[in-house]
Image (spheres, grey):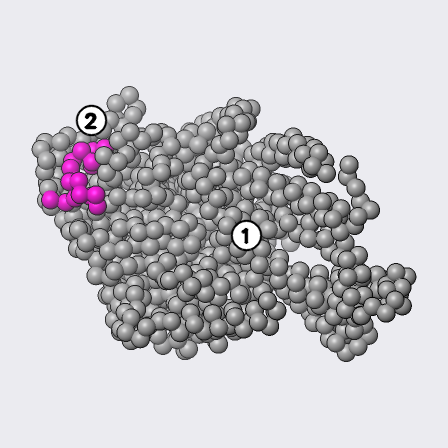
Amino acid sequence: MTRYIFRRVMSAIPLLFGLLTFTFFIIRLAPGDPVSLYVQGDVDPAFAQNLRNSLGLNDPLPVQYVKWVKSMLLGEMGVSFSRNAAVTKILADTIPNTLLLTVFALLFNFLIGIALGITTALKRGTCTDHLVNITSLFVYSMPEFWLGLMLILGISLQLDLLPASGMHSPLAKYLSTPRYLWDVFQHMILPVFVLGVASAAATGRYMRGSLLEVINQDYVRTARAKGLSEFLVIGKHALRNALIPIITLLGLSLPFLLGGAVIVETVFAWPGMGKLTVDAIFARDYPLIIGCTLVSGVMVILGNLLADILYAIVDPRIRYE
Amino acid sequence: MSPRLLFIAVLCCGLFVSCGKKSGEKDPMNETAVVALSGDADTFNPIVSGSATSGDIQGNIYPMMFDVSFDPRDGSLQYDPGLVVRWESANDGLDMILHLRTDVRWEDGILITPEDIKFSFSLYGDPEVASPRRNYVESMIFTDGKFDPNRSIEIIDDSTMVFHFAKRYPLQLFHLNLHPIPKHIYRNADRKTLRANPANEHPVGAGPFKLDEWVHQQQIDLVRNPTCTLPYPAKLDRVIFRIISEPTTRLTELKKGTVDVMSPVYPDDVKDIQENNPNIRLETLPPRSYEYIGWMNIDIEEYHNSGKKNIKPHPLFGDARVRQALTYAINRKGIMEHELGTYGELAVTDFSPIFRWAIKHDLIPYPHDQEKSRQLLRSAGWSDTNGDGILDKGGRDFEFTLYYNIGNKRREYVATVVQKELKDVGIKVNLQSVEPTVLFQNIEEKRYDAFIGGFRVKLAIDPSDRWGDVSNPFNTVGFQNRRIGELLKLGLHVPNERDAGPFWKEVQSIIHQEQPCTFLYWNKDIVGVNRRLKNTNINVLGVSDDMWDWQIGDPNSYMTY
């Protein structure tokens, strides 16, 4: 297994380099000028040209590429055009914000989704099943943007129960640790809910289908015939197999952990990777786009690897040696 | 721990935490104002900063050469002493002698000297630094085509310096009013990478506030700088700028009272705020930006390929009668009232109405008159010879594509109205929305026949950018007019700004007559302010002008946070 993981990690390096090279050229070939956004009526007319020179954008493309490869080999990702800071620093500042949001959203998604799936599978055909299914479809089809704004207007503005936006209150840094944590927790509730609820509805549907398939298998009938309690039959025998497709889902969801969620981040003023990436693309901030692509690429590769490893853990028939 | 126990534990913890505030504890929010912004600052180095947020905030961090105010009665800038206590023009207007204060210190205790100012101007003028304000030194002394700080700036003693100019012109004080930065901090900074210098994250200024913390894309905390004497120490302990890009969320925070100042409030939200939020007062900023429809005046192909000085006119829009006809055909007033209500002003030319002294008041805006439009198009040779409903001339249909930026609802509406109204006079308009970076690049490079654009004017009149050389990126429609060239030279070489009035009025007459583009309307931005915040002076200089004077009025109007 260790050798397998090592081989997979090694093979990821040329893959990532290829991805970044492709991104390097594709963003430069796309129309649009990184400096055009800063050229307004009250600035120096020669500003754009000077800035292009200063940022090295007037160099021929092969020269820019060689410079970029050199800096990447030295572990430098350059300086963001739009934020005037090192890309590594921007990523280091943004990734924790994103993780705080996405880890909890993912937990919410899988815990609630799995619980809903089990409940509806076990109560198949009952009112509860129908109600949950209809609600899930309703929630799943709701646009995040709309749901977020409705919650802000309802829960935050009208009922004044939770803060509307941001990661914490403006003066949170002066609060004691427990109050600070409580403050952050309050700020997380709405974005985590919006981010997790639609996926939880989808996960619930997967879980329901998977569990229904498993509980009709012979070995589950055998377990019941042996006189095991329903809790053990479902919890120990059926659930383990039913979780395999969910693990695939989990693996595929990992890139989302660092990819962020641009809509929720925008609505709730949560400075995460999603908004960072989209802003970088619209601003044609080449170094930052490459940095964000690297993070997403690494997460996709790691997510797939993790899913493969988890398969082996859940299903003893799978071996990678 | 069972889930039920865990839930109870979290609930108890929450109750404990939320009840933990002592009753006698002073609420720090009573000495704090919160401002909501749509975008973050790009840097706090005034030499290279370009974003509006940076401009607004750094004015409160860095010292000012002059304390500038804008007199709305006549529309001109007033200069009062700042770092410069007294100034005099000499050598027939070619020298400006500045007498400086000698008792002003940077936050770190080091005295501000003329060396700091000279060093800062050398950075502003260096093309390697790529300052957006490099053109402020353009009329000083150049050697071999490069700004020469040694010949331009002479330090007489600790309190006196002389700026030498290559010409006499009315904007000298305006161009001298740049923020200096501390030389002792940036002395060895690499000029090419100045915009990414780590020192920019921790600016050392001398203004009423100092930067306490900058959490990128979240908030910027300014605290009172107790040592400030320029112009006065701040009255508030702290001002926090929060970055909230989504307008509905920003407005919600203002309504909740968790934000004190928010800009811009959209005209559509005004009625609701006025009816339901008595704690918010709305203020209007005088107009500094306008929207227009650009018609390319010159032949694009010849402009890009020939390198000539005088380019032949555009086949569709090269004739002034056609451009006038287009303005007549479009119901600009209707568009403005639909989009801005009373928060707009019909644009006659690109001279902002704020410059009262320079405005030619007798110019009458083109009315919406489609018959007049048809008449003008006929006189320019355009008629529907083949009966297909589209005007044609010399075998060419009057058909073009109008470009605008995607996602801008206001411009989408303008484009739709323009398409419909020009169809009524026999012109076929195809609409094309484009991503902003692409649109702006192509506008600056003069690649579009027609587009919807916007422009923000400086606080001093200088039409040379907009209507000067055809190659200037801000002359987005390639307008060329010999008389305007002469008037620009005359107006920008008078000793006093007011002396240029007659020249600027003639420029407006020509622009009005020639219609290089169809000017739509001036925007008056609306600012929402919580009534607990007192002494705000929201004016054309920005939302945070005179921020040192802000105070929290009602100590009982606690913000919920």
Q: Which residue is mark 1?
A: A99
| Residue plotted at (23% across, 38% down) | B182
Q: Residue at x 24, y 56 (%)?
A: B224
Residue A98: x percent and y percent?
Answer: 53, 52
Q: Secondary structure at mark 1?
A: helix
Residue lying at 41% horizontally and 34% vertically, measured from the top left? A51
Whether residue B115 appears in magenta in the rendering, the answer is: yes
Residue B538, percent across and down? Answer: 29, 61
Is B452 situated left or right of B557 in this image?
A: right
Q: Nearer the viewer, residue B363 or B500?
A: B500
Task: Say if B76 sits above or below B549 in the image.
Answer: above
**Place of residue A194 in the rendered image (x, y in percent of width and height, measured from the top left):** 59, 64
Q: Quadrant of the C terminus of chain A?
A: top right
Position of B261 relative to A5 (above/below): below
Q: Which residue is mark 2?
A: B150
Q: Amino acid at mark 1?
A: Leu
